[in-house]
Amino acid sequence: MTHGLPPLSNGPDVGHFLPPRFGSPGLPAQFGIPAPLSPPRQPPSPGRFLVVVLVVIGLVAAVLQTLPVFDTALSEPAGSRTGTAAGTAPSFRPGDPLTDSKIYPMQVKGSCPAARSVTTREAYEAQVSSLIDCLAGIFKPLVNQAGGNFEAAKHKFYGRSTSSPCGSEQDAYAFYCTRDATLYFSDQVFEDSQYGRLMIADVVIHEYGHHVQAMMGMFEAADGLSEEKAITTRREELQVFCWTYYVFANVESYELSAADHSYFRDVWSHTDDPVGHGSVKAQQYWGARGLNGADLGACNTWKEPASRVR
């Protein structure tokens, strides 16, 4: 449904097509999208964390979203940010950690443990742990070469609620806390792993992507942008959304199939939070960019106009 916004162009954008090598080519994304709403106000917390919300699509796929919560000490005073017009992007500066990060020209290569559905809690926790270790091995040389501050990510499992240095969270699916560089996974991740062999990997890679952003100083740089906070949040979220599918396409052990292609299309075709994470159109655009990407720079949401992250 549209709400009076004009289309981005008069024809399909090639970036909205799925790559043919992952099955039959996809259809272009719909260009009409609702106008973004003001981001919901969140209570202050001692840190920033990003929470994954799960929406099951039928019985085979899940929409993985993240909801950022900002420490008031990290945010600018109310009214200090100015809106960014739909056709503009943050100013490009050579060496800028957002628009020109040194990690962008780098490529992800390697092999990780096979992704599969699990039936026991032990197998689930082992898959999460081994994947985080694998991602650390892949990204450590890239982060170091790019001038970032590599830090091994920790992870914790919890039931329905938990507390972290970033604050308490009730009914969160999974989240990343910058204060302790820890990825938190609720029991629901294990319970929903039956919906697809890539389910667990999708959650873990997404949250690890936020860890990469933290190591590269992107969150601090993003706090200084003169644009609406909701736009900045969508840039952060859609970047790791894109990186997730770039990793899937370039870590050879995943051996993506036509069934995986269908899983991706399901994930990209639904959203529970267009304000915080972008519309279906944005997901389809950045998901396809990730699968087609030649390097991590394919997911540079920071140099794009705000219309690309709506």
Image (spheres, rainbow, N blue to C red):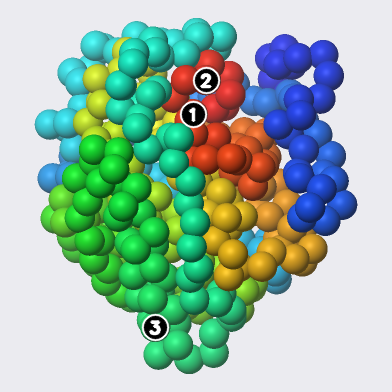
- State the residue position of label 2: 304
Residue 94: x %, y % from top left: 33, 16
Above-or-below relation of 149 to 219: below
Q: CA distance from mark 2 to mark 1?
A: 6 Å
Q: CA distance from mark 3 to mark 1?
A: 33 Å
Residue 273: x %, y % from top left: 53, 41
x 21%, y 27%: residue:
75
Residue with the most extreme right position: 24
Crowding at mark 2 (Cα within 10 Å: few <14, some 14-19, many 20+): some
Q: The residue under label 1 is which amino acid type? A: Thr
Residue 269 seen = yes
- Secondary element at tag 3: helix
- State the residue position of label 3: 126
x 34%, y 63%: residue:
137
Crowding at mark 3 (Cα within 10 Å: few <14, some 14-19, many 20+): few
- State the residue position of label 1: 301
Above-or-below relation of 198 to 9: below
Q: Quadrant of residue 174?
A: bottom left
Q: The residue under label 2 is which amino acid type? A: Glu
Q: CA distance from mark 3 to mark 2?
A: 38 Å
Q: Of the residues under marks 3 and 1, which one precedes in the sequence?
A: 3
